[in-house]
Amino acid sequence: MNNLIDYIFLAIIQGVTEFLPVSSSGHIEFLKNVFDNSSIQEHGAFLTVILHLATAMSIIFIFREKIKSLLSFKNEDSKNYIINILVSLIPIAILVIFNVDQLIEKKYDNGWSLNLVSLMFFITGFILFITEKINIKTKKITLFTALLVGIAQSIAILPGISRSGATICCALLLGASKKEASAFSFLICLPVILGKSAMDILSLDLINFDLNILVSFLVTFFVGCLCCNWMIKIVDNSKLKYFGYYCLIISLLAFSFENF
C-alpha cells in the first residue's frame, strides 16, 4: 500500500509540474531519491515514459479543438503553424540520430546525481528571472523562433531544466506573447513524447507494467486535465519570478539532501 501511495504522489507531482515551468523530470528524480523506493527505482525510465505519456494525453484532450483545426489544414496559418512545429523538432531529431537520447535514458535508469539536478533547477530559476525583466511583445512564432525553441526543448531533456520553462522563456525572449508561447510550448512536445513513448513501450519489458504503473498513468492524466488550463492561466497572468523562487528553493533542497 505504501508503494502505491508513493506512485500516486509521483503521478500528482508529474501532472502538476509538467504544466508549470519547474521541471517535472527534476521533481521525479528528486523524489525518487527522497523516497528511496526500490520498486520506483527499478522502473526507472519506464515510469518516466508512462507519466509523460499520460500528460501528453491530457494535453491532447485540452487542446483537441486546436489540434483538430491544425490537422484540417483549413488555412495558411494552420499550415505555417505545423511547419513551425516540424522545424522545432529538428534539434530533438539530431539527438536521436546521434543516440544522445539513449545515453540520457540510461542515466534516468541509473539515477542522476542530485547535485546536477540541483544545478539544473538553479539554471531554470535564473532563466525565469531573466525573462521576467523583458518587455513582452506580440510577434508570431517564426521559423527561426521555432528552431531556437526546439533547441531549448532538446536541452530540457536534462532533469531540472524545465521543458515548458525553457521553451516558453525562449519564445518570450524572441518576442512572442505569453499566450502564444504557452500554446506552442505545449503543442511541440506532443510529437516528441508520443514518438518516444511508442518506441520505448515497444522496446521495454512490458512485464514492468503493473498496477502501480497503471494507477500512476490514470492519476497523472486526470490531474493533467484538471490543471492544464489553470497552469496556462498562471503562466499567462502571473509573474515568472515566482516560479524562479520555487526552482531556487528546490535547488537548495536537492543540494542539501545530497550533501548533508
Image (cartoon, rainbow, N blue to C red):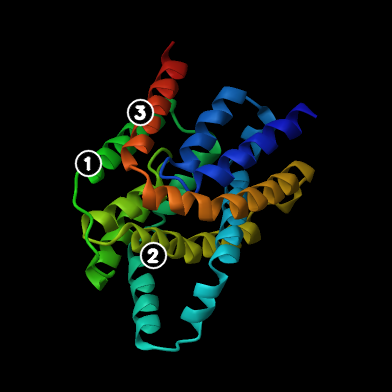
Mark 2: which secondary structure? helix
Q: Residue at 49% across / 66% down in the picture?
A: 191
Quadrant of image for the C terminus: top left
The disc placed on residue 93 is 2
For disc 3, the marked residue is 248
Is residue 228 in view? yes
Tell which residue pokes out farthest to the top in this image.
260
- Distance in Å between CA atoms under marks 3 and 1: 14 Å
The three-letter amino acid code for the residue at tag 3 is Leu
For disc 1, the marked residue is 130
Q: Residue at 24% across / 46% down in the picture?
A: 131
Circle 2 crowding by C-alpha within 10 Å: few under 14, some 14–19, many from 20? some
Coordinates of residue 197 in the picture (x, y in percent) = 58, 59
Q: Residue at 60% across / 58% down in the picture?
A: 58
Give left or right: position of 179 versus 211.
left
The three-letter amino acid code for the residue at tag 2 is Ala
Residue nearest the viewer, comparing 148 with 226: 226
- Distance in Å between CA atoms under marks 2 and 1: 28 Å
- Distance in Å between CA atoms under marks 3 and 2: 31 Å
Circle 1 crowding by C-alpha within 10 Å: few under 14, some 14–19, many from 20? some
Mark 3: which secondary structure? helix
- The disc, 2 or 1, on the residue closer to the chain's N-terminal end is 2
Is residue 116 in view? no
Give left or right: position of 123 versus 6.
left
